[in-house]
Image (spheres, rainbow, N blue to C red):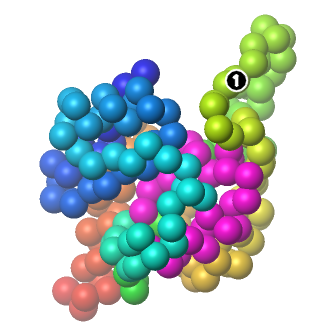
Amino acid sequence: MRGGVFLNEARSRGFDVTGIELNASMAAYARDTYHVEVLTSRIEDIPSNQWSPAFDVVTLLDCLEHVPQPLAAMKKIAHWLRPGGVVFIRGPLSNSSLARIKEGLRRVLRARKRLPGYPLDANTFNKRSMEALLDLTGFDSLVWIRATPSFSNLLAKKYVERTASWSGV
C-alpha cells in the first residue's frame, strides 16, 4: 500500500499539510516519496495540545470507523482546528449499498480485515449517528459530499468556497 497521495494533492493546491498514519509502511512511503510530514501514530496517542489550534482543514479518510472512542477523537480534532475550520470525513456509512456489498463479500469469502493497533470497524455510522457525533463535538454545520473520483479536487473547491464566504469575499 502507498500513502501520501492525498497530502501531496492537497499540498499541490496550496495547503500546508501534516498527516497521521497508523500504518508505518504507508507513513514512510509518504515521507520518502512526497516529502510530507506524516506521524506514525493513532489519533488517541497524540497530545491534544500538540496542535492548538493549527489547522483550517482536517480530513479523516476511512479511519473514523476504526477509532475505539470517536467522540474523544473528534473533540481532540475540534481543538486542533482554527476558528471557522472544517473537517471532512470519508468513510463507510453502515446503511450505504457499497458498505453492505463489501461486508457481504467479506462474509462469503470469510475474509478478515486487519489493522494493527485498532479494532476493525469498531463503529458503524449512518447519517443520523454521524450528525449526532459532530453535533456533540461542536461542529455546527454539515455538508454531505457524495463519492467522486476527484475527491481531493472537490475538497479543495468546497474549502475555497467556504473560506471565501467566511472572509466576506
Circle 1: residue type: Lys
Residue furthest toward the bottom?
168
Answer with the quarter of the image where residue 4 lies. Answer: top left
The residue wearing badge 1 is: 113
At x 67% / y 51%, what residue is drawn? 67
- The residue lying at 78 percent from left, 8 percent from top is 109
Quarter holding the N terminus is top left
Regarding residue 81, the answer to whether it shows in the image is no
Task: Answer left or right for 168 relative to 134.
Answer: left
Q: Residue at x 60, y 58 (%)?
A: 44
Membership of 78 in magenta stretch: yes
Q: Pinpoint residue 34: horizontal percent, then vertical percent.
A: 20, 36
Residue 127, given in percent of the width and then of the height, sits at 71, 59
Tell me which segment is drawn in magenta. 58-80
Residue most toward the top?
Answer: 109
Viewer-nearest residue: 139 or 158: 139
Residue 101: horizontal and vertical position, in percent? 74, 25
Residue located 19% across and 86% down the image: 169
Note whether 153 is above or below 16 in the view shown.
Answer: above
Identify which residue, 33 or 155, lies in the foreground: 33
For label 1, count other residues whose C-alpha is less than 10 Å away and answer few (under 14), some (14-19) or many (20+): few
Asked if 34 appears above or below 111 in the picture, the reply is below
In the image shown, does 112 or 154 lie closer to the viewer? Answer: 112
Element carrying mark 1: loop
Q: Is residue 107 above or below residue 124?
A: above
